[in-house]
Structures are given as C-alpha cells and as structure tokens.
Image (spheres, rainbow, N blue to C red):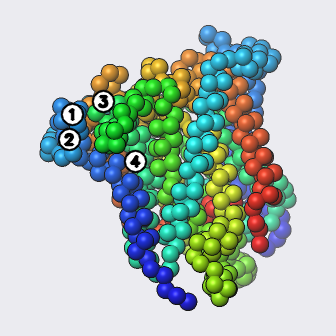
Amino acid sequence: MSKPRTWPAHVFLAAGALVMLAPFAWQLIVALQTLTDSLRVPPKFTPSWQWSNFVDVFRSVPLARQFVNTAVVTAAVTAGQLLLCSLAAFAFARLRFPLRGILFMAFLAVLMVPGELFLIPRYEIMQGLGWLNTLQALIAPGVFGAFGTFMLRQFFLSLPKELDEAAAIDGANPLQIYWHILLPLVRPGLLALGMLTVMWSWSSLLWPLVVNTDPEMMTLSAGLASLRGQFLTNYPILFAGSVVASLPVIVLFVVMQRQLIAGIAFTGSKG
Amino acid sequence: MHTRREWAWGYLLIAPMALGLAVFYLWPIVQTLFLSFTESGVFGGYTWVGTANFTDLSVDEEMYGALGNTLLYAVLVLAGVPLSIVVAALLNVPGLRGLSLYRTLYFLPVVTMPAAVGLTWSYLFNGDFGVINHLLGYLGIDGPYWLGDPDFAIYAIAVVGIWSSIGYNAVLFLAGLQGIPRHYYEAAEIDGAGRLRQFLRITLPLLTPTTFFVLVITMINALQVFDLVYLMVDPKSPSLEGSRTIVYLFYEKGFVQNQRGLAAAIAVVLLGIILALTAIQFRLQKKWVHYE
C-alpha cells in the first residue's frame, strides 16, 4: 500500500487547532490586562501583567467559597454515582431476579426525557425539605443516574460468568463478589464514568442557578455568570475568575484524557 | 446460591438507585405532566385549569419566537456536524503524528465549563471592542453588534455551540472510523480508487451509523440549549427576542416569573417536539444509514 503524505492533514488540523485554542489564549491575555486595556479599539493583543485581577476576583464574588462548593458537590456526586451506579449495574448484569428486564427498561426510559421536565418538581422537593441554598440540594439529585448504570452494566456483562461462580462456591455472597472480585475488573468503566461525571457536575448551570441563589452557596458556573455587569463588564476580572474556575477540569482532563475519551467513545458505540 | 437469596440480593442492590430515580426522575415526570394542567397560586398551591396553559401557548408570540429560535439554532448546529467528520477523518490519516496532541486541543472546549466559554465568546463577539469585528474589519466588513442584535444573536450563539462540540463529535466519529475494516480500503486500493473516492464510497457510507447517532444527540441537545443563551445575551437586551430558546422561556416562566404551570406546559411541549423529531430521524434512518 502506498504511504500517504500526512502534511496536508497537518495543515488543516493545525489551522483548526488554532481556532480551538485562540479564545483560551485571548481569555488568558485579557485576564492579565487592565480594565481600560481590555476595552481598547482596536483590541490590545498583549497582556499588561495586571496580576492583581486574580486577587480582585476573589473580592468581587465569594469565589473561594464557590470553588469549595463546586469541589465538594462534584466530589460527592461523582463518588455517589460510582457507588450507586455500579451496585445497580452489577445486580442487573450478574444477578437474576423477577422483573429484572422491566425494571431495567424503566431505568432506560429516564434517559429519553429532557432534563427540564425534572426541574420544577425537584425544586419543590428541595423547597419542601428546606434545602434551597444548600449543597445537598445540588448533590442529592446528582448521585442518581440511569446513564451510569447502563454504562457500567455493559462493563460487568463483558466479564466471564465463571468468576462469580467460583467465588460463590467458596461461599462469597453477591456483595463480596461485587466488591472484591468484579469491581476491580471494571476499573476502566469506573474511571470513564468518573471523568464524565466530574466534567458534567463541575460545569452544570441551570439547576445550581435555580436552587442556590445565595452567592455564598453558588457553584462556579452561576458565580461567574453573576459577574456580568448590566452595562459594563469588568472582563479582566471575569476572565481571571474563568481561568481559576475552568483550570481544575482542564488539568484533570490532560492527566486522564484516555479515560474520558474512552467514556465518550462508549456513549457512541452503544447508540 | 439459593434462588430466593439471589432475588433478595438483586432487589437490595438496585434499591438505592431505583429509589433515587423514582424520587428525582420518574415522580417529577408525573408531577410536571400534572402541573402543566394547573396554575400556581400566589401563596402556593394549584388550581386545575384544564388545557388553558396549552391554549395560551398556542397563541403566544413569545412561544413561537422561542420555537423558531430553537429550531434555527438546531439546524445551524446540525449543519456544523460535517466539520467533526472532517476533523476525525484527518486525525485518522495513517501514520499521522501528534494525534493525541490534536485530540487534546480539539477537546479543550468540551472540558471547559460553558460559563467560561460563553462569557469569553461574548467578549469576542462584542460589537465595539470585540476581536471578531476587528478581524472582519480587515476584510472590509463592518460587523454588527452580534449579541445585541436580534437578527444576529442566534448565529453567534450557534458558532459557539458548534465550536464547543467539534471535539466531542470528532471523538465519536474517530471511533466510528477506526471500526471500519481495513480490507475495504485495501480492496479499493487494488481497484485503483483514489483517496477522495475511497472517502466518498467507503468511509462516508460505512460511517453512517455513527453519523446518525451524532445527529440524533446533537439535535436533542440543541433543542435544549440554555447555557449559552443565558451567558451570552443580557437578560434586558432587545436581542433576546431573536435568541430566546424554549428552555430559556421555560426558565423565565418557571423561575423568574413564577408561573410554574405554564413553565411545566412548555416543558411538556418540548418533550413532544423532541420525541416527534427523534421519531422522524429514526424513520428517515432507513433511507440513508447502512448497517452491515
């Protein structure tokens, strides 16, 4: 087979990558500009090294608090998803019980419904519990997910049945089989689901926006949105905040990209 | 293991998830359907109003505006899907170096929170000091006030919508491309088919299951767009008329104006639209999707 040249592909891919990267570069530059420089016509393409923006943004909104809120919610939601989804997925994949198929279909049905249908009743649940403006209002609905259950079930199904049988003969109960034998083997699935959950939970906007209106209890997404001015936005400060807010997930992605990409490719393969 | 004990374990292990899904997913669906036939009172509580919310919506200009904006946005974003196919095909060129670097770069917008993305782009699209109009100026084009103009806002938002999903879709397409057996290409090579011909005759047809999946999820997501509109358009701007989407209207009615019943009806209409359009896509699927 002839060996194709790769440089034309590089030309197009590099041009595209530039378009992908440019807004980030621009955001970083402006995060280091003075307010006047950020509003210049024509635009000033160099930073003014105004590092104080990164300090000031913590004074304009309770950014440190919002950062902690977001981290706590994301950690709790991810841990909860991994535990509850894997438990249910294990049961659906490895145990036999009446109505299993119907129950699983009911789980899947949830995936077909747009998220907006859940919002008003969930809001009323939180209101009833007195949980508005609390972190548990963000965590509680987030730990449950049909997608994760479906995804991990596929991973459990791919493991040989003999593993469970051998362990059962040795007297292990299903919970022990799940925890000691199968869970370590579905690690790639857990990592992929974990990465997707971190990404979704860290960035989600609509639900945090409606349940937590107190700036102290907001997550970063809603907090950043609240930094917009009605007439004039202080972009350098806003962008300093954006950099701080989006960096953790970007770093995590760079470290764990194989797992995240595997997770996303999975969502495609089972369509 | 005794069968009865296996049953008990099965129910026990799915119980936490089943309970959570019932409380936070299934019950809310029922509740929203119910609420869509009610009106919320000033001091809480509901009054049954029959189909009044739906008849109100059927003559509501804002609702039709939102519907039109949402459909336009969906069409624009769907039109951006071929870009992801091109990126994936380029990444799939045999012997390409730097694949993981490119993938990382194209993926950055996907892993960045929409809040940061939307706010950054609203700066780029600014009519006075935005870089986009500055660059258009070199081409002799006097760019509009993108986000302040009802005729342009949704296009600007769609650009950002496409930009942030190229990487995601390209990963799906790349997985699809890698699933195409090599021997098809080897056979085409022997027959003397050029690379463009191979792409059109082998790659695109065999990729159609992935393309179909991407189009379906892209459409479903686009019909629910909220974040970018909320972040990029000032709530008091006149351009909201040209960029208010269905979910944005839902948010305004349900959580700003406290018309819960009407908001629930909007959500139900959205569900209907999504189901109908998805059903149409599945119908059309038979005409163009090749399953081996």
Q: Residue B111 at what x, y percent from top left?
A: 44, 53
Residue that mark 3 sits on: B128
Secondary structure state at the residue bearing disc 1: loop
Quarter of the rendering containing residue A170? bottom right
Identify whether B81 is placed above or below A8.
above
* Residue type (three-letter) at the residue carrying disc 1: Arg
Q: Nearer the viewer, residue B276 or B206?
A: B206
Q: Chain of mark 1?
A: A
Mark 1 and mark 4 lie on one chain; the one further toward the N terminus is 1
Q: Say if mark 2 contacts mark 4, CB within 8 Å.
A: no
Q: CA distance from mark 3 to mark 4?
A: 37 Å
* Residue type (three-letter) at the residue carrying disc 2: Lys
Q: Say if mark 2 contacts mark 1, CB within 8 Å.
A: yes
* Residue type (three-letter) at the residue carrying disc 3: Asp
Q: Which mark is residue A44?
A: 2
Q: Which mark is residue A71?
A: 4
Q: Chain of mark 4?
A: A
Label 3 environment density (alpha carbons within 10 Å; few <14, some 14–19, many ≥20):
some
Label 1 environment density (alpha carbons within 10 Å; few <14, some 14–19, many ≥20):
few
Label 4 environment density (alpha carbons within 10 Å; few <14, some 14–19, many ≥20):
some
Residue that mark 1 sits on: A40
Q: Residue at x 50, y 63 (%)?
A: B87
Identify whether A261 is placed above or below B224.
below
